[in-house]
Amino acid sequence: MPKNILAEMGSQVGLTPARQNKKEAEEWARRQSGPMVNPSFEPDDFLPQSLSPVKDEKKRPGDKGIFLVNMKEKNLQEVEEYEPYDNRVVEHPTTNTETLLHLLKGSLGTGILAMPHAFSKSGYVVGTIGTVVIGVLCTYCIHVLLDSCYVLCKRRKVPSLTYTAAAEAALSEGPDWCKAFAPYAAHVVNAFLLIYQIGTCCVYVVFVSENIHFVLTEHFKLNVTVFEVMLYILLPLVLINWVRDLKYLAPFSAIANAVTIVSFAIILYYIFREAPTLEGKVPAGKIGDFPLFFGTVLFALEAIGVILPLENEMKTPKDFVGKFGVLNGAMISIIILYVGMGLFGYLQYGNKAAGSITLNLPSETETLASVVQCLLAFAIFITHGLACYVAIDILWNEYIGVRMLNSNHRIIWEYLLRTLIVLVTFGIAAAVPELDLFISLFGALCLSALGLAFPAFIQSCTYWYYVSDSERIRMIVKNAIVVLFGTLGLVVGTWTSLEGIIVKFSGHGIVVNATEAPSAFTETSLMP
C-alpha cells in the first residue's frame, strides 16, 4: 500500500484548513461560500482545540495533524448522506445465499478436521463451551471490524477499505500517540497476514503429504517416508502456483469443493458407524494443553481474511451484518459444525484423535477410507494454490512488483517469487511435519492478533474523538479486555506450540530450564 494512502483518501473527504482556536474557526467559516445551515453551530463546542481538522497531504511519523471531516454543518450532512454501500461498483456482485455459501465453504478445510484432536486437549465439556465462546468472540470482533470500516468509509467518502487501509486510517484518527504509527499500520497487518498465509500453506503441505503417505503405507504397504511424499508433490505445487490468473483454477476449485462435501459426509459416516461413548473420555483436559486447543479452534473458526472481500463483493452488503444477517447465520452454522465434529470425533477416537481425523480412518482395511484421504488431499492441494495467491499478492503487489514497474525481467522475478514461496512452505513443512502443532502455532500467533486484538484496537482509534467521555471509557475497558485476551492467546499459545515442537524433536519433556515451569504446569487439570 502506498504510504500516502491516507492523503489520497483524505482528499476525497473535503478536509478543512488547520484552525488554532474558535476565533480562527469562525473567521474561516465566514470566508467560505454559502451560509451555514445552522449559524449557531460551533465545531469546537464538540471537539477540543487540539483536535481541529487539518489538511494533511503527507502523513509522517509524529505528525500532529489528523484526518477529520469538514466541520461545517453542511459537510457534516454530506458525510451523513454518503452511503458507501450505494457507491460500490462490483462487476459480478454476489447474492446473500452465494456469500453465505462462500463463507461456509471457506471454513470446511483442515481446521475442522483437527477439531477432534483439539477436543482431546480440552475435554468434551471444556471443548464444547470453549469453542462456542471463541466462536462468539470471533464473530463479535468481525462485527467490530466491519463497523469501523463502514464508519471510516463514510468519513472519507470511499466505497470500501481493505483491512490494511482501515488499520492505517483508524490509527490516523486515534489518540496522539497512535498517529505516529499510522504509516506503519498497513505493514504490520500485512506481516501478520503474510505469516498466516504462509503458515496455512505449510499446514496444507503437511496435510497432503501425511494423508498420501498414510494411504501408501497402510493400504498399499509401500515403504516411503512423509518427506519422500513431500518431494513427490513439490514440483506439482510449484506448477499450480505458477498460475497467475485464478480463473484457470476455478474449475479445479469447484471440483475440490464437491469432493470436500462428499468426503465430510463419509467421515461423519465413520464417526457414527459405531456409537460414540463417554467411556475413557474426560470432561476437561490439562491446563497446559488448553493453549493448543485455543490455537487450533482459532485457526479453524477465524475467517477474518475473507470477511472484508466477501462483504465488498455483495449485491446487498447491508444484509451482511445485523442480528439475522449473513455473517451471524454463517458463524452460527460454522460453530455448530465445529462443535459437532470436535465433540463426536473425540468421543469416537478419544486421545487417539490425530491432527487430522482422516488419519484415524481405517484405510488399511477399507478402500473407502483411502479414497476419502486421497480426495481430501487433492482438495487441499488445490487450495494451496489459492492460499499462496494471497501471500504472493501481498509481497508482489505491495512491495516487490511496485519497484519493478519498468523492469524488462518483471515476469521472471514474479515467477521466482512464486517459486520461492512454495520452497519456503515446503522447507518449513519438511522441517516440522507435525500437523496439529502447526495448526495451533499459526492460529495462536497470527489469528489472535488479526482476529481479536487488531479489530478491537481499530475500533478504539476510530471512535476515540467521536464518543463522549463515559462512552470512551466503556469502549476502552471492553476493547482492552479483548486485546489482552488476544495478546495472552498469542503469547501463551505460540509458546506452548513452539515448546511442543521442541519437545517432539528433542525426545524428552524438558528442553531447557526455562520450560520446567510450563512442563510442570501441564499436569494440572482444568477441573478438579
Image: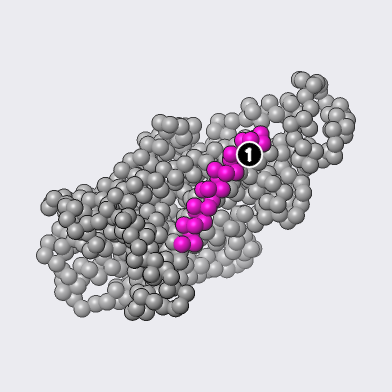
Can the viewer see residue 337?
yes
User: Which quadrant of the figure has residue 511?
Assistant: bottom left
46 shown above or below 449: above
441 shown above or below 276: below
The residue lying at 26 percent from left, 47 percent from top is 340
Residue 124 is left or right of residue 180, and the answer is left
The residue lying at 37 percent from left, 36 percent from top is 329
Q: Which residue is mark 1?
A: 472
Q: Secondary structure at mark 1?
A: helix
What is the quadrant of the C terminus in the image? Answer: bottom left
Asked whether 488 falls inside the magenta stretch, the response is yes
Total marks shown come to: 1
Give the prevailing secondary structure in the magenta stretch.
Answer: helix
Residue 281 is left or right of residue 510, and the answer is left
Q: x, y percentage for residue 106?
A: 37, 49
User: Which quadrant of the figure has residue 45?
Assistant: top right
The residue lying at 27 percent from left, 76 percent from top is 225
Q: x, y percentage for residue 480?
A: 56, 48
- Give, as a single range, the part of the protein colored magenta: 468-492
What is the quadrant of the N terminus in the image? Answer: bottom right
The residue lying at 78 percent from left, 32 percent from top is 44
Q: Nearer the viewer, residue 350 or 284?
A: 284
Can the viewer see residue 263?
no
Q: x, y percentage for residue 278?
A: 19, 53
Q: Nearer the viewer, residue 347 or 300?
A: 347
